[in-house]
Amino acid sequence: MGKILYLTCNKNEEHEYRFFVGIGMMFPSVYKEIINKIQQGKYGTEIKNFLQENPKGAINCSSEIAYCPKCGKLEEVVNLSMYVPKKNKQTVDTSYVMPSRLQTEYKKVKEYKHICSKCLSEMKIIKSKKEKIKCPECDGILKIDDGGCWD
Ligand SMILES: [Zn+2]
Ligand SMILES: [Zn+2]
């Protein structure tokens, strides 16, 4: 199930951003859709080649928030880290892989580089609520709060 996160500026309450993170009920079809887009080259050649070279590979299709350390842009992105099955694990169903299965049955081989659409720098994924994220609109810091669930 997904979560809604609110990012609120500590200097101006009007600077508030809302993001959907995690996975929803439609995850199996979302997963297939993302794999299709990767195979069509919509996320670049590196990840496309990864899937060609690793037919049993899996992709982290969880939604996350990325931020640009250079210009401060915030964006909802698909994680897209690349995984291969652990040697001792016999993966049964590869039509879609839940992020929880990635933790136990797979090994991460590569992280996808998210590029900022505004300044073309490499973005970072927000991994914890304690991270200090600069407000894109002023010099405040964004506080990250849970705002309930979605599916
Ligand atoms: Zn940027
Ligand atoms: Zn602000």
Image: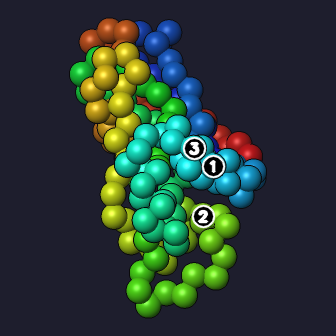
On screen, 14 above or below 69? Answer: above
Q: Is residue 10 visible?
A: no
Please name the amino acid that badge 2 sits on.
Met
> Callout 3, which amino acid?
Gln
Report the residue marked by disc 1: 36
**Residue 100: x, y in percent?**
54, 67
Q: Which residue is at a point 52% across and 72% down the rendered structure image?
A: 56
Q: Are marks 1 and 3 in contact (CB under 8 Å)?
A: yes
| Label 2 neighbour load within 10 Å: few <14, some 14-19, many 20+ | some
Position of residue 71 relative to residue 102, above or below, is: above
Q: Residue 63 appears in which quarter of the rendering? A: top right
The answer to whether 84 is drawn above or below residue 150 in the figure is below
Q: Can you tell which mark lies on residue 40?
A: 3
The three-letter amino acid code for the residue at tag 1 is: Asn
x and y percentages locating residue 116 in the rendered image: 36, 25
Residue 16 visible in the displayed image: yes
In-image side of 10 versus 35 (left or right): left
How are the residues colored? Answer: rainbow
Q: Which mark is residue 98?
A: 2
Residue furthest bottom in the image = 88
The x, y position of residue 84, in whole percent, is 43, 71
Which residue corresponds to the image point at 44% horizontal and 90% vertical from the top-left? 88
Q: Estimate the spatial distance between the alpha carbons at disc 2 and disc 3, rounded to whole Å.
A: 22 Å
Q: Nearer the viewer, mark 2 or mark 1?
A: 1
Disc 2 and disc 1 in contact, CB within 8 angstroms: no
Q: Nearer the viewer, mark 1 or mark 3?
A: 3
Tell me which residue sits at (32%, 27%) in the image: 68
